[in-house]
Image (cartoon, grey):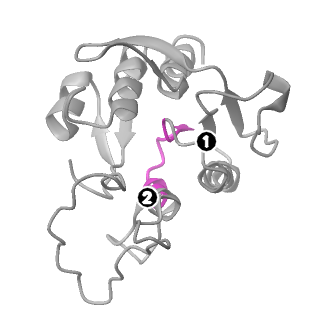
Amino acid sequence: GPTNEAVLCTNWSQFVKAFGDFSQASTFLAHSVYGFFNNGGSRCFVVNVGAPDDAPAAPAAPLKEGEKAPEKKPGGKVDRDGLYIGKDNGPGQKSGLKCFEEIDEISLVAAPGVTSPAVQDAILSHCESRKDRFAVLDSPETINGGVDRLVRPRDSKYGAYYFPWIQVYDPEKGNIFVPPSGHVLGVYARTDNERG
């Protein structure tokens, strides 16, 4: 699908047309959007931040005048946190989370399966600065020790943190565990529509 562009999907078929199905889109994103619609969500803006670090390298697109290449971490990997957090280089030049800034109808924000403290903090900050959005954040899939040892994001009245991951059926892989955020967002959206 398109990169660094907020794409409105009002049903699963639109998502598949733009980003692919379970076998083509990222597993977490596809199952999260599917869970969103199955749990009562009706309007979902999706931003593709780019290919995973371990994906086969695609031919590099030429940079536009004044555009910088993505930052690389030691070892040559692209800084994934930076891709999610994004940059604002003016109109039509936004990336990552910054793509949502000018869309007023967004009320819930998530990055399915992303457990990076930097990204989760950026999502919380985005929601706090807007004051009309709520972040739904995912925990890591597994933890060492009890739930009390779980490293949590900072406390905020503009966000919630969910554990554990949930088991769903994947047509290609059978039963798998996925982050809960997409499914929870669907329940939030359904409740907002039914009760206000």
Q: Is residue 43 visible?
A: no
Q: Circle 2 sits in a helix, a strand or a loop, which is it?
A: helix
Q: Is residue 174 above or below residue 127?
A: above
Instruction: Give coordinates of residue 151: x percent, y percent.
Output: 77, 39
Of callouts 1 and 2, the N-terminal one: 2
Which mark is nearer the camera, 1 or 2? 2
Q: Is residue 78 left or right of residue 194?
A: left
Q: Is residue 129 left or right of residue 74?
A: right
Residue depicted at x 50% and y 65%: 82
Magenta part, dominant SS: loop
Q: Is residue 86 above or below residue 108?
A: below
Residue depicted at x 50% and y 36%: 113
Instruction: Give coordinates of residue 99: x percent, y percent.
Output: 42, 58
Q: Is residue 57 left or right of residue 132?
A: left
Residue 190 part of the magenta-drawn span:
no
Residue 33 or residue 143, whichever sits in front: 143
The label on residue 177 is none
Q: Circle 1 sits in a helix, a strand or a loop, which is it?
A: loop
Instruction: Give coordinates of residue 94: x percent, y percent.
Output: 39, 67
Location of mark 2 (residue): 96
Residue 176 or residue 39, whichever sits in front: 176
Provide the residue span drawn in magenta.
Answer: 97-112
Which quarter of the picture shows residue 133? top right
Q: Is residue 143 above or below residue 175?
A: below
Location of mark 1 (residue): 133
Quadrant in the picture for the C terminus: top right
Residue type marked 2: Gly
Residue depicted at x 67% and y 51%: 117
Residue type marked 1: Arg
Q: Is residue 6 visible?
A: yes
Residue 126 or residue 196, whichever sits in front: 126
Instruction: Give coordinates of residue 172: x percent, y percent.
Output: 22, 17
